[in-house]
Image (spheres, helix red, strand yellow):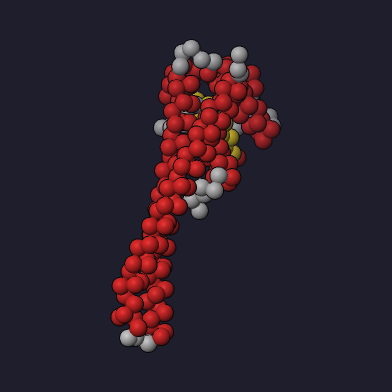
Amino acid sequence: MMSNDEKLKNFERQALQKAEQRRDEINRELDNATGEALADCKKVFRRETARIRSKGVEEARKEARLIVSTAQNKGQSAIMSKRKEIIDEVFGALVKKLRAFTESPEGNYGELFEKRLTEALTAATVHLGESNAKITVEVTPADYKQFSKLIEEVSDRIVVWANTDVKATEEDIIGGCVVNVPSLGLVIDNSVKADVLREREDFLSWSNLSLG
């Protein structure tokens, strides 16, 4: 039986495999779109040839460059749009799976939540020492309702000297928790959303789909 971490990695692996397939499909579409854009450019250029010939050489070059630049910009816009489409599709599906996992009564999300909470609070103690600083634990409204007692128990065990406050965040963090220590300007993001964002950045770095 897979552990919770293995389940999350499996969700991510399936999504990325789908992404690679979609990337190959879109690349073929982009090749066709780029060819069409260049063909349009050539048609426009041919139509304008007679008129351009009657002008000075430098002005003719400027008009030619403008025509080519317009076609290139059109092609680049199409590429960027397709890339965003792939990324949104892949990671939208991943978020949907992860959300279903955190909401399923049959899963082991509670174990994952406790692990994430323990890791975040333990990391906070490294910076806190034995001070009486205030710690805020932010969780989803559903997790607040379900795990408030657990959060209190884990907090009392790990940071017994700190003043811990639990808050249902309005931000969609999907699951897990975000631990804040305002006096230190410290934020420990151990949410499921943070995992998705890290995976998205890794994906963009190797997939040739970077939007930058």
Task: Name the residue: 34% across, 72% down.
Answer: 46
Image spot of residue 128 (x, y percent) = 66, 33
Q: Is residue 8 left or right of residue 68?
A: right
Q: Place residue 77 in its image quadrant.
A: bottom left
Residue in the foreground of this view, choosing between 57 and 157: 57
Q: Residue 73's quadrant in the figure?
A: bottom left
Please report the residue visible at 40 percent of the width from the left and 78 percent of the height from the top: 62
In the image, what residue occupies the spot 47% across and 47% down? 27
- Residue 98, given in percent of the width and then of the height, sits at 48, 26
Given residues 46 and 126, the one toward you in this image is 46
Left or right of 73 in this view: 209: right
Looking at the picture, how far across and down is residue 158, in whole percent?
A: 65, 22
In the foreground, 134 or 118: 118
- Residue 149 versus residue 53 in the image, above or below: above
Res 162 seen here: no
Q: Residue at x 48, y 12 (%)?
A: 106
Q: Percent position (x, y) of residue 48?
A: 31, 75
From the viewer's perspective, is 47 left or right of 88? left
Residue 10 visible somewhere in the drawing: yes
Above/below status of 99 relative to 47: above
User: As displayed, is residue 82 above or below residue 4?
Assistant: below
